[in-house]
Amino acid sequence: MSFKTDYKGVAGLGSAKDGTGHWVSQRLTAVALIPLAALFIYPFSIALGSGYGAVQAIYSDPFNALVAIGFFIVAFRHLRLGLQVVIEDYVHSSRALTISLITNALVWRGFAVAGAFAVAKIALGA
């Protein structure tokens, strides 16, 4: 027994079987952000307003650098997943939807890579 309407059967429209994975990923990133944000904010608040030498001293500690990199990667993934839902709900043109989803994925992944690269560059003293 199929729960598809006749139109969906002909057009090939049905369950994408991706909603649960997306929902779980969104929740896991939200939970991961709780400790990561707490561990990221403290050294960041100390480094804020300090000179480059102080910032480099704080982030040359591997723990602080790895927490900052993890925070950027998880935060931008969480942001990308949330914005994807908003785009899918409110963009109705097929072409605009495709362009928006591709742009969303590229921009936030680019920011995550740039943030990780910046922290690694500071931590390694380059």
Image (cartoon, rainbow, N blue to C red):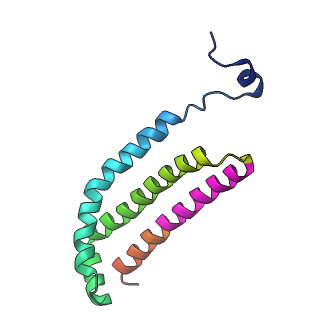
- Residue 66: image quadrant is bottom left
Quarter of the image where the C terminus is located: bottom left
Q: Is 12 on the left or on the right of 83, as rendered? A: right
Of 80 and 69, which appears nearest the observer?
80
Q: Is 41 on the left or on the right of 23, as rendered? A: left
Is residue 42 visible in the rendered image? The answer is: yes
Quarter of the image where the N terminus is located: top right
Q: Is 114 on the left or on the right of 37, as rendered? A: right
Looking at the image, which residue is at 32% across and 88% down? 52
Residues shaded magenta: 95-112
Looking at the image, which residue is at 52% across and 53% down? 83
Of 94 and 125, which appears nearest the observer?
94
For residue 10, above or below residue 106: above
For residue 74, above or below residue 90: below
Residue 38, x across and y down, in percent: 24, 61
For residue 69, above or below residue 27: below
Looking at the image, which residue is at 72% across and 46% down? 94
Of 6 and 56, which appears nearest the observer?
6
For residue 104, above or below residue 63: above
